[in-house]
Amino acid sequence: MAENSFLPILIILILAIVFAFATVGLSAFLGKNTYEKGKLKPYECGVEPVGNPHIRFDIKFYLIAIFFLLFDIEALFLFPWAAVFIKLGLFGFVEMFLFIVILLLGLIYIWKKGALEWD
């Protein structure tokens, strides 16, 4: 019976893939392929773009995004751990404590380096 337990998931996966390809294929086959002057503009709002579109962004925007993802992943690990905290016992507590300490040391490091400052 164990070998058939993934059969419904496989059927749904195949149906999803077939549906995705069928809808994209039907829209390409049945849809209108007309190109209007307005559709070929960079923006459809009617306002011509001003300036260079290739502007360099400050690296701090990317660093803040990476820090956000890091602590978001930390929260992602904390929820399942909290759900099985009693079953894990002291070992689970020590492991999660070490995980949080390592992340806290990383936060202190980036804070001391000034990565969170908006000069």
Image: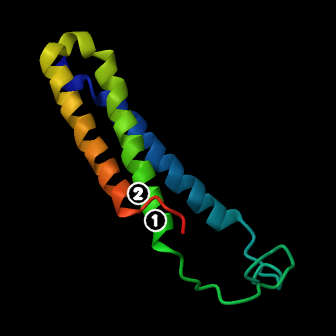
Task: Confirm or deny contact between disc 1 and disc 2 (CB under 8 A).
Answer: yes
Mark 2 — residue? 66
Mark 1 — residue? 62
Tell me if residue 117 comes above or below residue 70 in the rendering.
Answer: below
How far across and how far down the image is residue 67, in percent? 41, 53
Task: Tell me where residue 100 sits by quadrant.
Answer: top left
Tell me if residue 116 comes above or below residue 17 in the rendering.
Answer: below
Name the residue located 57 percent from the left edge and 61 percent from the top edge.
25
Tell me if residue 95 comes above or below residue 41 in the rendering.
Answer: above
Which residue lies most toward the right here?
46
Apparent side of residue 32 relative to residue 76 in the rendered image (left or right): right
Name the residue located 33 percent from the left edge and 19 percent from the top edge.
82
Q: Which mark is residue 70?
A: none
Which residue lies most toward the left here?
91
How far across and how far down the image is residue 33, in percent? 73, 75
How far across and how far down the image is residue 26, in percent? 62, 59
User: In this orientation, which residue lies closer to the viewer: 57 or 37?
Assistant: 57
Q: Quadrant of the C terminus?
A: bottom right
Which kind of residue does numbered mark 2 sit on?
Answer: Ile
Which kind of residue does numbered mark 1 sit on?
Answer: Tyr
Q: Quadrant of the N terminus?
A: top left
- What SS does tag 1 mark? helix
Crowding at mark 1 (Cα within 10 Å: few <14, some 14-19, many 20+)? few
- What SS does tag 2 mark? helix
Name the residue located 23 percent from the left edge and 42 percent from the top edge.
102
